[in-house]
Each structure stands twice: as C-alpha cells, then as structure tokens.
Amino acid sequence: MALLEGRVALVTGGGRGIGRGISELLASEGAAVAVNYRKDADAAADAVNAIEAAGGRAKAYAASVDDVEQDAAMVEAVLNDFGYVDLLVCNAGIASRGSNVVDTDPGELQRVLATHAISAHHLCRLVLPSMRTRPRGDVVMISSAATSYFLGGGAPYNMAKAALEALAYTLAKEEMRNGIHVNVVAPGLVESEMGRRLAKATGGVTDMRDVDARAPFGHVCQPVDVARVVLWLTSDGAGYVTGQRVECDGGVPNPAVLR
C-alpha cells in the first residue's frame, strides 16, 4: 500500500523546483496534491499533468501566499474539491537581494518575511480545523540551512526562515494533542531556479554540473532529495517525530559547496 494513500496535501510553490519534487513524490505515494502557484500557471499545469500521467491526482490553485484573502479562497477551493487537507507543505519562497542591513529596502524585508513566514501562519490557521478531524495531520516547513550559519548580506531571508522555524516549533507543541506533526526541512544548495541564481550570484557558477565534484555524494542536491525527507516525516515511519529540524545539505555547509 502506498505510504500516503487517502491523504490530501497542499504544497505551496508546488509547481517548480523543490515544490514540484515534493508534489510529485507525495502523489506517487498516494496523496492527492493541491499544487499552489503564484504566477507560473504553465509550470503548475505541467506538474499536475505529470502527476496525472503517472496515475496520481492533482489540481493547481492560484494564490499569492502572502495575501490572506487569496489564501482563504484557495483553502476553501481545495476543501471543496478534496474534502479535507491533512498534509501542508509550506514551501513557497523568494530570495533576498543580498544587501547588508544598512542598504536593505524596507519593502524587501516586508515581502520576504510575508512570503516565507507570515504566509505559513495564515495557511496553518486556515487548514488546521480540517486537519484536526483526520486520523493524522502533518505540517512541514521548508526552511534553509542558512539558519545554521546566518551569513551577512541576507538578513531578510535569514530572518524569514528563522521566523518560519519558530512557527513550526510553536505549532508542534500546540497541535500534538490533535495528532498533528509539525517539522522543518532545511535544504542546502538545491538545483532549482533559486539555487541556480544563488550559485551564480555567490560563486559565479553558470553550470551546476561544475559544482557536482565539490558537492557531497558527487552531485548537487536535487528536489527529489528534499522531497524524500518530507515523505519520511509525513509517513508512519516518523510517527513519533514532531518539532524537529532535519538538514538536507549532505553534511556540507552551503557556502563550502560553492568554493
């Protein structure tokens, strides 16, 4: 039997990069997947088509996760379509511009915090009533290994991911009585659109294959590598795990891979 048979997952930013890897793997293990996207409808549709072609169930939902009204409309639509949500993956995110604090635009700080952390709070609040009715619930926050070293030149991103983790630890304590598990996955450098931009900006990398030899296990972390951690955390194999943070960086800090 598939590990997630009968479950319904909402994956924010689920049409591209890490989010798509998570959407496809959860669907392959039996979950119906609500694929959230903000602008790239084509990517979300492609992810849904790939899931359906493999025999899974999925549907795309447009919402800018930093907009509480759009979040509410999306969750209502997912509940109408699938009946409940018992697995939420807060994956949607944006990068900060890499400026020092003194040079950071206040608007950027607000956008990054809202996209990563405040949106997750909104979505948890909206799905918890449904999740509490199910035999098991799971919330997984996709954070970053950046919160292990807090490099300069990225305070909005560092702050946003730290706030996201704080939400996870708090929610884990609040919801364990309701059978809901809340955990954090913290990837290092991942081969995704955001990862490629990061590698180019910080290491001058134009071809990720050039990084493979320096990366753990001979390759840059792939979206499916992160997805496998999410799958384990949301399966019965992690039935006694909550309030935990799992790094997925191959044991090597992100900056070291780009040197």
Image (tube, rainbow, N blue to C red):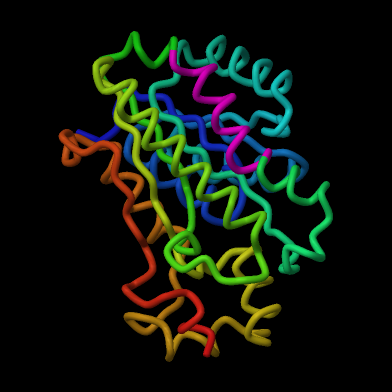
Q: Eyeballing the image, is 116 above or below 118?
A: below
Q: Which residues are magenta?
A: 114-128
Name the residue at 36% across, 37% down: 169
Image coordinates of residue 152 in percent, x first then y, are 62, 71
**Left or right of residue 44: residue 132:** left
Name the residue at 64% across, 59% down: 155
Give the dominant element type of the magenta stretch: helix, strand or loop.
helix
For residue 122: magenta? yes
For residue 4: magenta? no
Considering depth in this image, is 56 or 129 the residue closer to the camera? 129
Quarter of the image containing the N terminus? top left
Considering depth in this image, is 85 or 82 the residue closer to the camera? 85
Considering depth in this image, is 69 or 77 the residue closer to the camera? 69
Image coordinates of residue 119 in percent, x first then y, are 62, 32
Determine the image quadrant of residue 140. Answer: top left
Image coordinates of residue 243 in percent, x first then y, are 29, 38
Q: Eyeballing the image, is 31 above or below 72?
A: below
Q: Eyeballing the image, is 246 above or below 197?
A: above
Determine the image quadrant of residue 180. Answer: top left
Name the residue at 56% across, 9% down: 80
Determine the image quadrant of residue 138. Answer: top left
Considering depth in this image, is 125 or 88 the residue closer to the camera? 125
Image coordinates of residue 182 in percent, x first then y, are 34, 34
**Left or right of residue 134: residue 214:** right
